[in-house]
Each structure stands twice: as C-alpha cells, then as structure tokens.
Image (cartoon, rainbow, N blue to C red):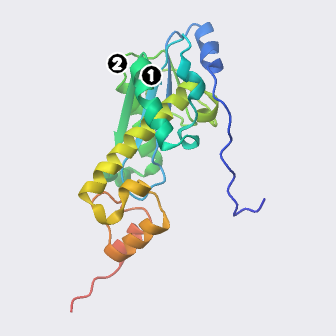
Amino acid sequence: MSKKQKRAPVKRIPTYAREETLISQGYAVIAGVDEVGRGPLAGPVMAGAVILPSVRLDWFDDVRDSKLLSAAKRAILAPMIRRDSLAFGIGIVSVSEIDRMGIAKATMLATVRSIRSLALKPAYVLTDNVKLRGIGLPHTAVPDGDTLCLSIAAASVIAKVARDEIMTEMDKRYPEYGFAQHKGYATAEHMQRIYQIGVCEIHRKTFFPASEILMRPKFED
C-alpha cells in the first residue's frame, strides 16, 4: 500500500467487554466519550459522552463507530441511545475557541465538557484515544476505541448526529456554501466555494485555505 493510499475503516464490532472488566473492578458507572469534527474547515468540534446500562438492549448489536454507519442508521440509533442511556452529554467548542487554542486543545476541551454535562457522575471514563487532564476521574485513552468499546461507539453516534444537525442549521444561514451536504469538511465543492466566495463566520480562520485567503493583501481600486 502506498503512503498516499488511505486505509479503509476497520469494521470491528464494538463490545461491552472493557466496560464489564472495569465494573468487575468496582467502577460501577462507566462513561464512553468520543469526539467529532477535528478535521472540518468550518463549524465546532464536539464530543459525546454516554453511560450505558449494564443490561443488554436489542440495539447494542447495531452500534458501530459513527463513520461506519449511514446517516439514516445514525438517525435511528441516536434517539435510542439518548433514551436508554443512564446519562448522556454533549460538549461543544466553538470556532473562535478552536482558532484561539488550536484543534488539539479544543478537542480535549470538548471531551471534558461532554463529561461535565453528564447528569450522572461516572466512576471511570473511556475515551477514543484522547488523553485528558484535570477531570479528577480515572480514565483510559483507548486506541481505536470507537471500534472496540460499545460506550465510546454510542458516544460517537450521538456526537455525529448532534454536529450534523448544527451544520444543517448553518446551511440555512449560509446556503451558498452547501454545509448541509458536506458538514464543513474539505470536499472539492466546499473548497471551490471558499475560493469563489471567501470565508464566513463559521469557517476556522486558522485552517487552510481560510488562513491563506485572509492573509492575502487587499487592493483598492
């Protein structure tokens, strides 16, 4: 495989095994957390946090990393996850915050905010490979956690659906960019519109190409 070729997402089935191990060690309430929106050129970065019941539910078998699910399937699963979870939360970090602190710190902040928004305090937190500081809770950053851990995968679904809803709303405010279709990601269509129209309020000004466009000198006629 060449360096330019991207690996296809691994189609693992997430399980509740890691959560069950932690429960057996005395951690009664386990939160899974995942982020969405690190890479887009526009819109917030967000994270979802989910505390699943230990009792197995029918829809558990359908949950996957949100990137492996169709939009229609995510739309079916998200309300079930929100309805049946012991608690769920969403953390949002705005475009201005991303531009001020950088995407790495913004992603961590979204993760922390999602945990703090939970109505039930977790005893342990599992993240999708995001190492946390200052949350005062034991936690593990699990590589490929959204494909391995059921609670992280469930969190990825509600985060993705919540962010897509925001970007669809932004499409009504800025219809010329097509946010409802690409959700702010760097598609060829989105890049073309940025170069043709310029940037809007929800573009990340520190991300290319917005950063390049804003640095161009302005000439008066």
- For disc 1, the marked residue is 136
Type of amino acid at the residue the image marks with label 1 = Gly
Residue farthest toward the bottom in the current orientation of the protein:
221
Image coords of residue 107 (percent x, y): 45, 43
Structural distance between the alpha carbons of marks 1 and 2 = 16 Å
Q: Is residue 184 visible?
A: no
Q: From the viewer's perspective, is residue 6 above or below residue 107?
A: below
Residue farthest toward the left in the current orientation of the protein:
221
Q: Is residue 162 visible?
A: yes
The image shows a total of numbered marks equal to: 2
Type of amino acid at the residue the image marks with label 2 = Ala
Q: Name the residue nearer the viewer: 162 or 99.
A: 162
Q: From the viewer's perspective, is residue 215 above or below residue 33?
A: below
Image coords of residue 27 (percent x, y): 54, 11
Q: Secondary structure at mark 2?
A: loop
Q: Earlier in the sequence, mark 1 or mark 2?
A: 2
Q: Is residue 197 left or right of residue 137?
A: left
Q: Name the residue nearer the viewer: 218 or 86.
A: 86
Q: Name the residue nearer the viewer: 1 or 209.
A: 1
Q: Secondary structure at mark 1?
A: loop
**Screen quadrant of the N terminus:** bottom right
Instruction: Look at 42% across and 52% down and name the residue there.
Output: 102
- For disc 2, the marked residue is 119
- Mark 1–mark 2 CB contact (< 8 Å): no
Instruction: Look at 44% across and 22% down and name the residue there.
Output: 136
**Screen quadrant of the C terminus:** bottom left
Q: Is residue 20 left or right of residue 200?
A: right
Image coords of residue 100 (percent x, y): 35, 53
Q: Quadrant of residue 131?
A: top right
Instruction: Look at 40% across and 41% down and name the residue there.
Output: 46
